[in-house]
Amino acid sequence: MAEEKEYIISGVLCDDHTDLHEGEVVLRFNHWKALRRVFRSWVEHTTKLEVTLKAFRYQRSLAQNNFYWGVVIPTIRAFEKERTGITPSPRQIHAFNLVHVLGDEPKVETVLGKEVITLSIKSSSSMNTKEFKEFIEAIQSYFDELGCYIPDPVPKTNNHLTDFIGVKDT
């Protein structure tokens, strides 16, 4: 039996292939040669497949997430400690950014008979790369006005705090 592995591969649907009949489409995979090798290994073992198709969506990247939680949040926490002597938690800073930087309005609603606080905007974890970049830029602008410099992400790194040692305020 073949190894139980899962492969995720992207591609595009198109209807401009010369030998297609009216209404037919073809799925063109990126990296199809690698996929062909996987298929060949599975055919040798007569493996049944489960295929799931979904529209491709860019999600915020791991580097963006690392930058936010590993650079932006600690920078704001350190700034606030310097300014007031109080160090808010990372979750408190995140909530502040959603409410005061993005302008989300928390609402008290009754859910299952209990009052809960809800936010109406998209969560940062469901933002795509462009939306998350704009979120970071809004935070940088907001805190820059308060005198807190948050550096830009460092290209081609994982954007951990250690990637920013030696970065100077310009």
Image (cartoon, rainbow, N blue to C red):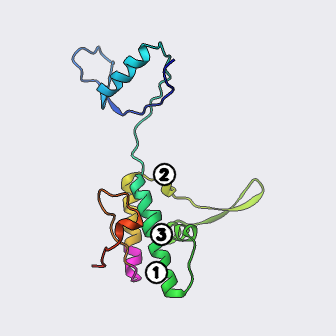
Of the two numbered discs 3 and 2 in the rendering, the one whose residue sits closer to the viewer: 3
Residue at the right extreme, as displayed: 113
Residue under the point 50% across and 81% down? 80
Query: Which of disc 3 and disc 1 is earlier in sequence?
Result: 3
Residue underneath mark 3: 73
| Amino acid, disc 3 | Ile
CA–CA distance between discs 3 and 2? 18 Å
Tell me if residue 30 comes above or below residue 133 in the rendering.
above
Question: How packed is label 2: few (under 14 Cα within 10 Å), some, or many (20 or more)?
Answer: few
Quadrant including the C terminus? bottom left
Query: Mark 3, residues whose alpha carbon is within 10 Å: few (<14), some, or many (≥20)?
Result: many
* Residue 91, percent from left and from top: 57, 67
Q: Which of marks 3 and 2 is nearer the N terminus?
A: 3
Q: Name the residue under label 2.
A: 126
Query: Disc 2 and disc 1: Cα gap in Å?
Result: 27 Å
Q: Looking at this view, is 132 or 114 the one in front?
A: 132
Q: In this view, does 152 lie above or below 168?
A: above
Inter-mark Cα distance, 1 to 3: 10 Å
Disc 2 marks a residue whose amino acid type is Ser
List x then y, in percent, for residue 138: 39, 68
Picture residue at 43% right of the left edge, 31% below the top: 7
Judged by depth in the image, the label closer to the viewer, 2 or 1, is 1
* Residue 59 drawn above or below residue 53: below
Q: What element carries label 2?
A: helix
- The picture quadrant where one finds residue 37 is top left
**Badge 1 amino acid:** Phe
Tell me the residue at 52%/67% (across/down). Answer: 94
Q: Mark 1 points at which residue?
A: 79
Badge 2 or badge 1: first in the primary sequence: 1
Horizontal and vertical percent for residue 74?
47, 71
Q: Give the range drawn in magenta.
A: 141-148
